[in-house]
Amino acid sequence: MLTHLKRTTTLLILSLLLLSPIKSFAQEKTVFRDNQQWIQYASDVNLSNKWTIKADASMRYRDDFNNKSQYMARSSVHYRIKNQLTFFGGLAYSGYYENNKDLFREIRPFQGIGFNHQVHHLPSNHRFMIEERFIKSRKKAPTAFKRYHSRLRYRFMVSLPLWARSGNAAKKLILRLSNEIFLTPNKTITQHLFNSNRFLVGPEYQFTSGLKASLTYTYQFSATAVRDTFHQSNIYRLKIKQNISL
């Protein structure tokens, strides 16, 4: 157990170091700060050993639940080539708020690759994604999604087993650590290649093989549409997830 904790502490320090250049980059810039609260439900439907349908829906608030921030519904199909390698593609629909009023909406197709392996005997995952974002403003009430930009994402996640109930392997407690960076190659929204960075940490408890819940903290640092202006958020997320096998 102590060995696992030492290894995870090392991974945590490395993840924090990944954040340091971004914070230094914005040290002399304007930074706006807020807190956000995310509530999410997710499900995995396992059709076979190779095919899985994933779906999730979330509602996001800011300023201690006083203001709506965003809602999202998302679904994707995953195909596992080997135990370590998965390809997936899907679609997300999202709406954004400003002062609790519907500001703009987005349709977001996405594709990606997931790769699982062990880091010092700890389960870890690499995820690469590309998103095609089609956006329309509610203020101008256009008839089509006229704004478009792509976004690249890379996430590294490691899982630390903390506890498992003796005689019942389904009940267990896991600590999740991840760091994800977002890039916008065409710079149409943020005027930077860098879009945002998310560092996540938090426990996940598995009640049964088909039900788990997690409560996580995310430090998010993002570029904005205004040059040299950035946005930092402290995000607290409650997530309920079901796993269904057909």
Image: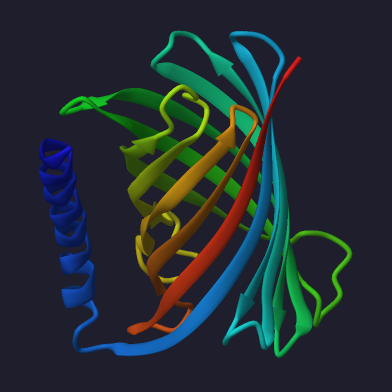
> Which residue is situated farthest in the front direction here?
167
Residue at position x 48%, y 20% in the image? 86
Q: In the depicted view, which residue is nearer to us: 167 or 31?
A: 167
Q: Is residue 228 left or right of residue 238?
A: left
Image quarter where the N terminus lies is: top left
Residue at position x 58%, y 85% in the image? 64
Q: Residue 168 in the image: state x and y as whole percent.
A: 50, 24
Q: Looking at the rendering, which quadrant does residue 201 occupy?
A: bottom left
Q: Residue 156 in the image: state x and y as whole percent.
A: 32, 41
Q: Is residue 192 left or right of residue 150?
A: left
Residue 189 in sight in this render: no
Q: Is residue 101 left or right of residue 193?
A: right
**On screen, 111 above or below 149?**
above
**On screen, 124 above or below 80?**
below
Q: Residue 95 in the image: state x and y as whole percent.
A: 74, 66
Q: Residue 110 in the image: state x and y as whole percent.
A: 60, 39
Residue at position x 65%, y 21% in the image? 52
Residue at position x 46%, y 22% in the image? 167
**On screen, 42 above or below 197?**
above
